[in-house]
């Protein structure tokens, strides 16, 4: 997305108050500048593009970016991102929302703002998810020297003063639109310095699963992909069943956690259904936030690892199967229509869910300690359900409308070819 094509969408989040949008009233006081920048972000979020552009032109026209202006921008960014984090958003959530709604310059600016926010906290007081997500985004406090971040960043990105300020306002406008979410990880500075150890998936198992799924996604032979995926499923399931039995003998078993899985358009509802069925098969619960295109999954950390790995791979394979089916010359033109593809993915997810449930039942029945495993799994599920209900006390179900019978049938056929007997 180019600098001249910045999209803004309004939301229902609580927005911080600010003074009237008037650059002539801005002094050299960074606090007042921060208030004015915040007001510009709110006005931008509300769609008042003309007033925002006039404000930016006045600021940029008064001369080169000053230290006071850059400091005011920094204060505004830190205040707003702090509010966003208190609203339950994690760094990767902000990044995913940003890459869907603002340009690459604004995305990069927000990454810097988040990294600067976490920098002052002692590492032992920041829950590992925050650092891990920022590391994944390659975030860091790269700026150095006497010049403030805004000036260094604008120079690094080859932006004019007006372009830099426009990007900043667009980025902060997105943040003030973000709604309040459930707090699924401790805020920076509040984490336990000595957290209890979680029983995650063995790294050797994870390595083997990742290797199998990577091969399944890269091969051009469907039979090979099915075999590799089935083997990955088998490894994760056997490991999970062994773990719940071990946890049952532990005085302090792991408490359920939560993660968010973001989905790319198109056919987000159908893809959400695929995530949902994999979630259920891995003893977790999930809820879909359609307005922002993500799912929150609740479950044990190792089960959440399995959900992320398997859904990522299955989404790749389902999309490939959908496109391949649509490209077959024997199919009608409908096979390349939006209705067909949505029906295909929905049917694929539905059938995969049925087969996973049946295969899980078989795996449990054939377990060497099946009599003991059933009550342990029931207790585990109650723990997950309680955690889910605490986060989401009011959940509303919704259906998916299907308008292509041909797409539905093709999706079922593709799902039937995916062998999950290993589960």
Image (spheres, helix red, strand yellow):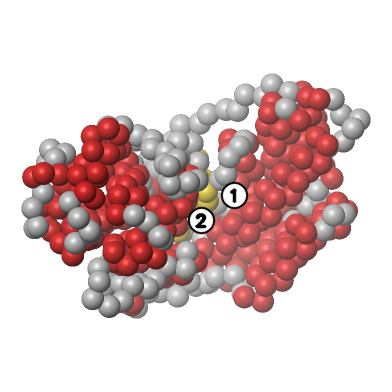
Q: Is residue 121 above or below residue 241?
A: below
Residue toward you, 374 or 397: 397
Neighbours of disc 1 within 10 Å: few (<14), some (14-19), many (20+) = many
| 359 displayed left or right of 374 | right
Q: For the image shown, how many numbered marks are present on the structure?
A: 2
In the rendered image, the quadrant that contains the C terminus is bottom right
Is tag 1's residue or tag 2's residue first in the polypeptide sequence? 1
Q: Nearer the viewer, residue 393 or 75?
A: 75
Percent position of residue 380, x then y: 53, 57
Q: Is residue 72 visible?
A: yes
- Left or right for 364, reference 48: right
Q: Quadrant of residue 349?
A: top right
Residue at (59% x, 70% y) in the render: 201
Label 1 close to label 2 by CB (< 8 Å): yes
Residue depicted at x 51% and y 63%: 301
Q: Residue, x 52% and y 48% (percent of image)?
A: 262
Residue sitting at x 31%, y 76%? 144
Residue 239, relative to residue 57: is it above or below? Answer: below
Residue holding disc 2: 299
Kind of element beneath mark 2: strand
Nearer the observer, 294 or 115? 115
The CA distance from mark 1 to mark 2 is 9 Å
Tell me, yes or no, if residue 94 can be seen here. no
Instruction: Give the x, y percent position of residue 5.
Output: 45, 40
Q: In screen coordinates, is 378 left or right of 50?
A: right
SS at badge 1: helix
- Coordinates of residue 275 in the picture (x, y in percent): 60, 46
Which residue bears the numbered disc 1?
Answer: 279
Say if 89 sits above or below 415 in the image.
Answer: below
């Amino acid at each position: 997305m180019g600098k001249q094509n910045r999209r803004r969408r309004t939301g229902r989040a609580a927005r911080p108050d600010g003074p009237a949008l008037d650059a002539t009233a801005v002094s050299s006081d960074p606090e007042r500048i921060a208030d004015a920048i915040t007001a510009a972000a709110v006005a931008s979020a509300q769609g008042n593009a003309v007033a925002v552009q006039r404000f930016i032109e006045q600021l940029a026209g008064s001369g080169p970016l000053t230290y006071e202006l850059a400091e005011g921008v920094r204060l505004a960014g830190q205040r707003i991102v702090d509010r966003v984090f208190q609203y339950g958003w994690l760094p990767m959530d902000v990044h995913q929302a940003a890459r869907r709604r603002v340009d690459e310059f604004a995305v990069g600016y927000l990454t810097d703002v988040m990294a600067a926010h976490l920098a002052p906290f002692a590492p032992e007081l920041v829950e590992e998810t925050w650092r891990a997500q920022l590391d994944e985004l390659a975030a860091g406090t790269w700026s150095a020297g006497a010049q403030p971040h805004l000036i260094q960043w604008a120079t690094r990105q080859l932006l004019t003063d007006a372009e830099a300020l426009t990007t900043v306002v667009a980025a902060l406008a997105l943040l003030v639109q973000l709604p309040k979410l459930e707090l699924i990880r401790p805020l920076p500075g509040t984490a336990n310095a000595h957290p209890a150890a979680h029983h995650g998936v063995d790294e050797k198992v994870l390595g083997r699963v990742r290797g199998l799924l990577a091969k399944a996604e890269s091969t051009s032979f469907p039979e090979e992909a099915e075999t590799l995926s089935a083997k990955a499923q088998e490894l994760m399931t056997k490991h999970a069943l062994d773990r719940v039995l071990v946890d049952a003998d532990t005085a302090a078993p792991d408490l359920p956690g939560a993660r968010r899985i973001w989905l790319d358009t198109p056919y987000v509802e159908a893809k959400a259904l695929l995530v949902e069925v994999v979630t259920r098969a891995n003893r977790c619960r999930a809820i879909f936030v359609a307005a922002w295109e993500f799912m929150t999954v609740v479950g044990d950390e190792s089960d959440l690892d399995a959900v992320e790995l398997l859904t990522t791979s299955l989404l790749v394979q389902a999309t490939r199967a959908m496109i391949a089916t649509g490209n077959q010359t024997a199919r009608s033109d409908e096979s390349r229509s939006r209705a067909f593809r949505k029906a295909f993915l929905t049917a694929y997810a539905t059938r995969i869910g049925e087969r996973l449930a049946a295969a899980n039942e078989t795996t449990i029945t054939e377990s060497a300690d099946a009599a003991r495993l059933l009550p342990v799994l029931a207790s585990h599920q109650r723990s997950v359900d309680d955690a889910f209900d605490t986060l989401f006390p009011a959940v509303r179900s919704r259906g998916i409308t299907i308008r292509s019978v041909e797409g539905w049938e093709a999706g079922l056929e593709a799902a039937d070819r995916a062998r999950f007997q290993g589960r």
